[in-house]
Each structure stands twice: as C-alpha cells, then as structure tokens.
Amino acid sequence: MLHSFTRNHNDLSTEAGFQFEFFCDCCGNGFKSTFVESTTYEKKKKTERFGGFSSMLGGLMNNRVGNLGYSLERGSNILGDRLNEQSPAWRKEHEAAFDNAQEEVRPMFKKCPACNKWVCYDCWNDEQGLCTECAPREASYVAQARARAMQRNIDEAAETAVVWQGKIETRTTVCPRCGKPAGTGKFCNECGAPLGTNHCPNCGAEVALGLKFCGECGTPMSAPQPQPTGKCPACGYENEPGTKFCGNCGAKL
C-alpha cells in the first residue's frame, strides 16, 4: 500500500512514466518530483515494433512463415492490451517510483509537532520549531496586528467624518399635463409643458401650473385674488396697501 508523507499530493504518472506533486498543508505551494520513465513502457514499445516487423516479414514469405509472423503479432497485441490496463509490473514500478519521489521531495518540507502538518520552509518558524499557523513569526504577526489596528482606526474615523454637507431632501416636480417627473428645467422633459407654480388665492400656498384646486386648503385656483387693503380692523382707519401696522392705532394689519 502506498503512503505519502503529506496528505496533499497529486499523481501525475502515466503509462510512459512516473511523476508526483507534493503540496504544503498550510499555503498549498508544492514541489514536483523528477520524471522517471517506465521500463515496462519501453518493453511494450519494443514488442510492438517487433510485432509490426514480423507481420510485414510474414507477408513476404510463404504461408507457413507468414502464419508464424501473424502469431507473433497477435501475441504482441495481447501483451499491449494487458499493459494498457496497468500490469502488475507497472504497478510495482509505480510503487517504487512513489517511494523514491517521497524521499526526493521530503527535504523540502517540515513536520509540525503541534498539528502534525507537513509544511514548506516559507510556513516554518525556525525559532519556535513549529509551523507559522501554530507559532506565527513575531515580526509578521506584529505587522499584521498593526495593519488591522490601522484599518479599525480608519473605519472609526470614517464613521464620524463629514464628507458631504448638501441637502438630502429633494423635491421632484411632476408635470401637471402628463403626470411624469418633469426634471429641473422650465419645461417638462416628457411632454414639453411649461413648468412653474401659482399661489393659492386663499392661503398663498404654491400650486403647480395646471392644477385647478389648492393642495393645502382646496380653494379653486380660479377664485378671484383678494385685493390688498389697508383698512385697520381695529379702528377702521384707511392705511396704504401693504402697511403692516395701523398708522392710527398701531394694530397689526
């Protein structure tokens, strides 16, 4: 039975030869063993060449010799089929090649006594005698801790930073003719109707052009606008239109 010194390995062997990859249990980096050509494959090629030559020779000789060549060719094909199904000789070669590949690649790995992982030298802490997952290198760990702390500080500062001071509230103008968002221009982006507002004749609220009633008080927009007057409600004195306080008694108009 075959046993690898690391759980992570890959068999690249073919009928022509044997080669294996072994990977670090931590980082996944690996090393490839030297390719070893299969001796059974070489024998197979020689047998196939000999069988082909015998078949050609048999066609040139009498029937008896030809039958002998046919028999040799047939035996060659049977042997080739058996080798294609990985013969015991090939499997024996494979086992020996795997053992040799392990010995070849083993010096590139270290076994951690804490977690029993086989790791490459990039993942090995010589000072502690452990892999870097069990005992991270001090300089690397300090650098990582500082980087994590810097990220936390940046995130905390970003939470309180004011990066925009505009108004979030926006008012979408709806076209009074087509009912779709009209944009910010003087005319509707959809139908081209003029945009603007009127003032309610009753409460003075802004009402979009084309609306027949005030959205605040329900007064018809066709109602007559009240004429400005300066008559004081307290004393009846006629003040100039637009005056805010009565010039006779001081009452608010």
Image: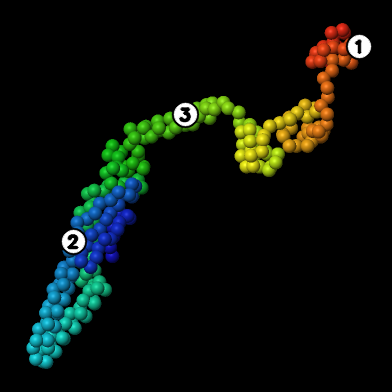
For this rendering, which residue is in front, 229 or 1?
229
- How crowded is the residue under tag 3: few (<14 C-alpha within 10 Å), some, or many (20+)? few
- 3D distance between C-alphas at marks 2 and 3: 56 Å
Task: Please name the residue that numbered disc 1 is placed on.
Answer: 235
Where residue 36 is drawn, which disc sits there? 2
Residue 137 placed where, x, y %?
33, 36
Q: Closer to the N terminus: mark 1 or mark 2?
A: 2
For this rendering, which residue is in front, 168 or 133?
168
- How crowded is the residue under tag 1: few (<14 C-alpha within 10 Å), some, or many (20+)? few
Amino acid found under the numbered disc labelled 1:
Cys
Q: Residue at x 23, y 52 (%)?
A: 105
Quick one: SS at disc 2?
strand
Q: Quadrant of residue 185?
A: top right
Q: Quadrant of residue 190?
A: top right
Amino acid found under the numbered disc labelled 3:
Asn
Task: Please name the residue that numbered disc 3 is placed on.
Answer: 153
Q: Closer to the N terminus: mark 2 or mark 3?
A: 2
Tag in front: 1 or 2: 1
Q: Is residue 210 left or right of residue 79?
A: right
Q: Is residue 95 visible?
A: no
Residue 184 placed where, x, y %?
61, 33
Q: Are marks 1 and 2 in contact (CB under 8 Å)?
A: no
Quick one: SS at disc 3?
helix
Amino acid found under the numbered disc labelled 2:
Val
Q: Residue at x 23, y 59 (%)?
A: 19
